Amino acid sequence: QVQVVESGGGLVQPGGSLRLSCAASGSAFTINVMGWHRQAPGKQRELVAMITSGGSANYADSVKGRFTISGDTNKRTVYLQMNSLKAEDTAVYYCNADIMTTRGGPFRYWGQGTPVTVSS
């Protein structure tokens, strides 16, 4: 069984910073991609950033230059450093792990989400 667990959300003032962490656990799988999505109230879930097993990172245009994804898919961990936060960054942030198993894949697993609120 695969588990994905996020932490690090909270309340921060505009212009502030937060760091989200995510770890995947379980057995008999490798990870191709780990990433972060977010879902604001009344909106669809959207990609924020992702990192591949080769270390390549991609970002949504709305967070480029402010957010940095890091981590190691071999260690099954990923982080999201969020700087210069804006009110529009307020959302529940979800970590995903896209895994390969002996049954094939990739299969996407999600964490439970961690809320981020940017407000004065």
Image (tube, rainbow, N blue to C red):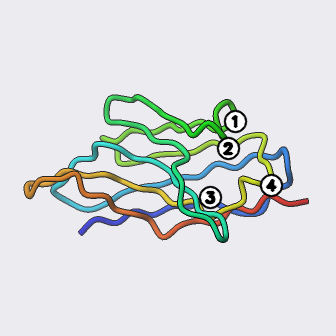
| x then y, percent, for residue 13 | 86, 54
Q: Residues within 10 Å of mark 1 (few under 14, many from 20)?
A: some
In the drawing, does residue 108 fall left or right of residue 68? left
The disc placed on residue 8 is: 3
Image coordinates of residue 78 in percent, x first then y, are 46, 46
Q: Residue type at mark 1?
A: Arg
Q: Residue at x 70, y 49 (%)?
A: 18
What distance separates the C-alpha of mark 1 from that of mark 2? 6 Å
Q: Which residue is mark 1?
A: 66
Indicate which label's residue lies in the foreground, 4 or 2. Answer: 4
Q: CA distance from mark 4 to mark 2?
A: 13 Å
**Label 3 close to label 2 by CB (< 8 Å):** no
Q: Secondary structure at mark 1?
A: loop
Q: Pointer 2: what residue?
A: 82
Give how far apart the Cα atoms at labels 4 and 1 are: 13 Å
Residue nearest the observer in this picture, 70 or 59: 59
Disc marking residue 40 = none
Question: Which residue is the site of mark 4?
Answer: 87
Give above or below for 76 relative to 109: above
